[in-house]
Amino acid sequence: MELFGAVTHPASKKADWWRSAVIYQVYPRSFADGNGDGMGDLKGITSRLESLASLGIDAIWLSPFMPSPQKDAGYDVSDYRGVDPLFGTLDDFDVMLNRAHELGLKILVDLVPNHSSDQHAWFQAALNSPEGSPEREFYHFKDGNGDLPPNNWVSMFGGPAWTRVTNPDGSLGQWYCHLFDSSQPDLNWENPKVQEAFEDVLKFWLDRGVDGFRVDQPHAMAKAKGLPDHPYVDRAGAGFIEGEENPPMWFQDSVHTIFRRWRAILDSYPGERVMCGEAYVLPLSFMALWVRPDEFHQTFNFRYLDSLWTAESIFKTVNESFEAFDSVGAPSTWVLSNHDVIRHASRLGGDYGRSTASDGIGPKNPQPDNELGLTKARAATLFTLALPGSMYLYQGEELGLPEHTTLEDEFRQDPTFFRTNGARVGRDGCRVPLPWEAGVNASNGFSSTGSAWLPQPDIYKNYSRDLQEGKAGSTLEMYKAVLALRKELDLGHGSFEWVTELCTNSSLAFRNNGILVIHNFGSVAISMPEGQVLISSLEGVSDEVRPNETLWLKGL
Ligand code: NOJ
């Protein structure tokens, strides 16, 4: 393989917790149900916190639990300072937070500032106020072009990014912009009142004791003045094409001043409070601008998540990552799965590139090979957890959970499915409730009654946590072992260099703090490097590096 561009990365001398943290994403709807109604909730999370602590993670990111009509599973917030009754109360939140802190776990909450719900008091006030009023200035209300929307923008979930309102007298009125569902109007971040309102929201949660925020869609918050047409909407749809001009709804420079102010607020609190931006910004040299020392602490390394699992692609991505993030002194924040993409245990079991990742896998699509997917997923996890930096895990990956790929349409909830008339099945398949105790009821212990807001496929029983607890070779025990080793060897703060003689078209190897990590991407076993094997992603022992195996070795 062409080893052009091989980078090295020095060990980090900065001890900040977030530079090396392993952060576990809890998707509250599907983690654990404390009241038996089939919907995960805060009491459920509290009851399972010890299990999380035993995994060896450092922090938890909680997807939204704030009041919401749940049109986009909580990413449509109608009150930024509360808890949706579906999930409990603010008191339940405080109990959860305190217990997490007692167990040494930090808590990041999800903040959704690009858009609110259409049921938010701000939007309702805007609807009930005349054109040009200060209330309408909270959002992007515009006149149309005759009967057409103000511009050619389309929604990330399909269909137009504009919806026309009806005036109180029944006549057709202005249009409002929504880059996502029509129930998620985009806020107008040019408006200082919007900025002030969100600074208060930050303080509200920081005062309660949260350790920080995961910030939703920060790269969409600022829009180009005058909201001009997307210059190549026909080719990019709602998105962008790397290397071409930035579309007017993405990556506008003016957004950075907002995050600098937020950073100053976080820094004014005791403890190291952090923000991680879901900035889908590429190339990574551009993403690096979002993690300059006075802005976000972290951004998700989406290039890594998007990369094909091949030696060439991972080699290039890792180089690009260290080059970009080291240039601003930020850690890379590695990630393989989340609530928006096909779980990596399924993605790697078939031919699913990034382009389909948020489209999901439905019963009519080619089905993944779950065994191969899990083998590769375990190896990918071991490889990734050996890289210096921070890592995000998505709930259920520690069980090796596959995607639910045969969910019937009647259960679907993702707006992507509805806005594309089923052409994209969407993200429900990665959001199915977790199996905790095999066979205790239809939800395998997710709820006490067996009810679950999305049904589990039959195979989930086999992945239940209780079957894996203490069982040698289980994915759960592999995660525990590797997280403990990572900490013991201080790999998160460690150094990085490729072992070039072991980097080929079918293998990659690197060293971090003296530990040699090798992965065999090929279909033929390769010679074992010298050293003592500390951990393998495969069961059993071999004197070679087997296909799809990752090994950590200690020098002799
Ligand atoms: C990104 C979130 O992760 C996703 O779930 C959501 O649908 C969109 N942002 C809109 O908030």
Image (tube, rainbow, N blue to C red):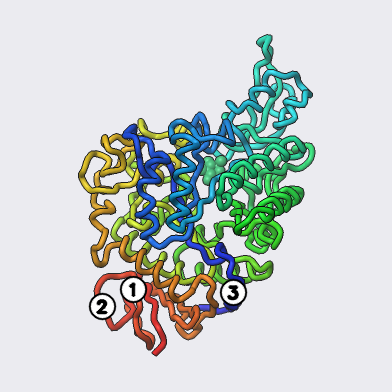
In this view, the residue farthest toward the top is 169
Instruction: Say what amino acid the circle numbered 1 marks.
Output: Ser
- At a point 56% along the width and 62% down the height, the residue shown is 18
In this view, the residue farthest toward the left is 439
- Please give the label number shown on residue 12: 3
Q: Residue beneath label 2, please?
A: 541
- At a point 39% along the width and 40% down the height, the residue shown is 43
Q: Position of residue 350 (x, y in %)?
A: 37, 56
In this image, 28 relative to 316: left or right? left
- Please give the label number shown on residue 536: 1
Instruction: Say what amino acid the circle numbered 2 marks.
Output: Val
- Answer above or below: position of 207 versus 52: above
- Please give the label number shown on residue 459: none
Between marks 2 and 3, how big is the CA–CA gap?
Answer: 34 Å
- At a point 50% along the width and 83% down the height, the residue shown is 500
- Answer above or below: position of 128 versus 454: above
In this view, the residue farthest toward the bottom is 556
